[in-house]
Image (tube, grey):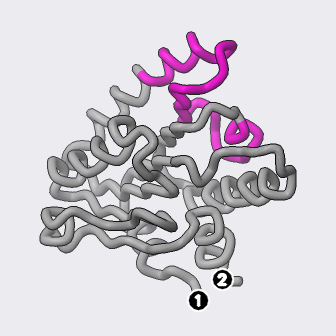
């Protein structure tokens, strides 16, 4: 079954903010890494024609092998060789985020738990609260819960699923 709600949210939005968490962290398992890369590429297809920005809390640089545009990705915990670029990208992200206020913003929080909640989870909740034209989907296998305030807005919903599997299965219709 295709997640039509999320596709409609993305389609109706002017801008899309994506947070990628530990469910996208690469490992020594190449098959798993390939699935993650495929999920990134599904995400890239969903974002065609949209203004977007991706923030990843991972350290592995795997996202930069995907079809997502590197200029619209920040990975603050990434490898040392990207540290300077990461700081500049963070500034770009902050400017981009400031420009979303008052615009129809779709927030996709994918696989973000509590490893670094100060980087994505808590700021995304605040963004939903401040931007009254925003909507949010939180996908996580263990921690999909929404706060009471988020539920009351009627602009957020959650999915209990591995975010990688959700992108590969639910968002492609397989």
Q: Label 1 near label 2: C-beta < 8 Å?
A: yes
The quadrant holding residue 135 is bottom left
**11 left or right of 86 in image:** left
Percent coordinates x, y for residue 147 in the rendering: 21, 62
Reply yes or no: does residue 92 show up in magenta: no
At x 55%, y 57%, the residue is: 47
For residue 25, above or below residue 128: above
Instruction: Give the Cα separation between the discs numbered 2 and 1.
Output: 6 Å
**156 left or right of 90 in image:** left
Name the image quarter holding the C terminus.
bottom right
Percent coordinates x, y for residue 167 in the rendering: 61, 67
What SS does tag 1 mark? loop
Mark 2 sits on what residue? 173
Magenta region: which residues?
Answer: 62-90
User: What label sits on residue 1 in the rendered view?
Assistant: 1
For residue 4, above or below residue 56: below
């Amino acid at each position: 079954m295709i997640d039509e709600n999320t596709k409609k949210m993305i389609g109706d939005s002017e801008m899309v903010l994506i947070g990628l968490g530990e469910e996208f962290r690469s490992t020594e398992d190449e098959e798993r890494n390939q699935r993650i890369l495929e999920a990134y590429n599904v995400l890239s297809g969903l974002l065609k024609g949209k203004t977007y920005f991706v923030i990843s809390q991972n350290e592995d640089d795997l996202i930069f092998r995907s079809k997502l545009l590197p200029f619209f990705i920040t990975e603050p915990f990434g490898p040392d060789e990207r540290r300077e670029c990461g700081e500049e990208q963070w500034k770009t992200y902050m400017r981009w985020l400031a420009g979303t206020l008052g615009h129809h913003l779709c927030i996709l929080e994918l696989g973000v738990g509590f490893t670094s909640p100060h980087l994505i989870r808590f700021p995304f909740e605040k963004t939903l609260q401040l931007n009254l034209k925003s909507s949010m989907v939180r996908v996580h296998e263990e921690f999909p819960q929404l706060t009471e305030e988020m539920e009351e807005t009627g602009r957020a919903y959650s999915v209990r699923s591995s975010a990688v599997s959700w992108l590969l299965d639910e968002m492609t219709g397989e």
